Amino acid sequence: MVETPITFGIIIPARYASTRFPGKPLANILGKPMILRTIAAAQTAAPDCGIAVATDDDRIAQVVSGYAEVVMTKDTHQTGTDRIAEAVDLLNWDCDVIVNLQGDEPFVTTEQIQALLQPFKSQNTDIATLKKRMQDDELVSNPNVVKVITDKNNRALYFSRSVIPYNRGNTNYPYFRHLGMYAYRKQIVKKLSMLNATLLEETEMLEQLRWMDYGYVVRVIETEHEGPAVDSPEDIKIAEAYLKST
């Protein structure tokens, strides 16, 4: 039986007013704004799909124009998913799945995109994301690194900035880092954006906990690839070193 291919589009939410790193999408990485490196990586990873940047800032729109489709969104969105929901309405793409690629992920690969899409071959999947096994104890204990645990069917049990699970039994349980790329069925994005924030989400500051609070299942797929994400100005040097080594 021939499988029907999953049709998808990539939307990159990008805002200028980041609390920890204002202007992050336009940060210079070896002579090129990070948002343009993210677009280029997405075009290489998925050359046959639509790619759009959803932003509320004219500076970002001017830099991106000519490299990807630009969607101007409201400046009141609290999460990237909320911004994507508005962009989906404005774009009116004819596709099955929307990939949410963060603007600070300039090293996305074809393998990661394919891994994200794999669960959607089952009609039971509405949301998917990625994880990578961690070997560094410092990453495990770092609250800026989001951890995830799943059940035997790759469904998320919990995401946390804390160390999960707590290894009281001194076992070899593997620790996994959550990679902040998501894919959603197109019709689900709007539903997610209409959910009210929950206390659990506000406690950990992780929007995916809102979805789980409301009963949505998040499929989590393991990947072997992880390029450096840029969360702070200090990460620019790490990204530049990574580029020089590849």
Image: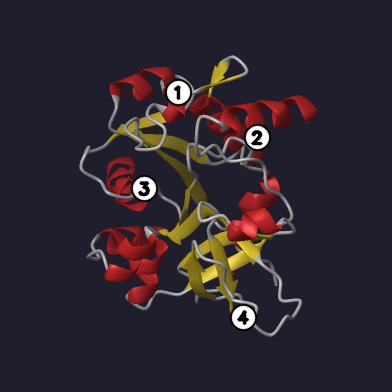
Q: Quadrant of residue 192?
A: bottom left
CB within 8 Å, label 4 to label 1: no
Q: Amino acid at mark 1?
A: Leu
CB within 8 Å, label 1 to label 3: no
- Label drawn at residue 117: none
CB within 8 Å, label 2 to label 1: no
Numbered marks: total: 4
- Label drawn at residue 44: 2
| Front of the two marks 2 and 1 | 1
Q: CA distance from mark 1 to mark 3?
A: 17 Å
Q: CA distance from mark 3 to mark 2?
A: 23 Å
Location of the N terminus by quadrant is bottom right
Q: Earlier in the sequence, mark 3 or mark 2?
A: 2
Q: Amino acid at mark 4?
A: Asn
At 59% from the left edge and 81% from the top edge, which residue is drawn? 151
Q: Give neighbour class at mark 4: few <14, some 14-19, many 20+ (Cα, 10 Å).
A: few
User: Relative to 36, does residue 10 appear above or below in the rendering?
Assistant: below
| Nearest to the observer: residue 198 or residue 46 | 198
Q: Earlier in the sequence, mark 1 or mark 3?
A: 1
Q: Earlier in the sequence, mark 4 or mark 1?
A: 1
Q: CA distance from mark 4 to mark 1?
A: 39 Å
Secondary structure beneath disc 2?
helix
- Label drawn at residue 153: 4
Residue 234 locus on image (x, y percent): 56, 31
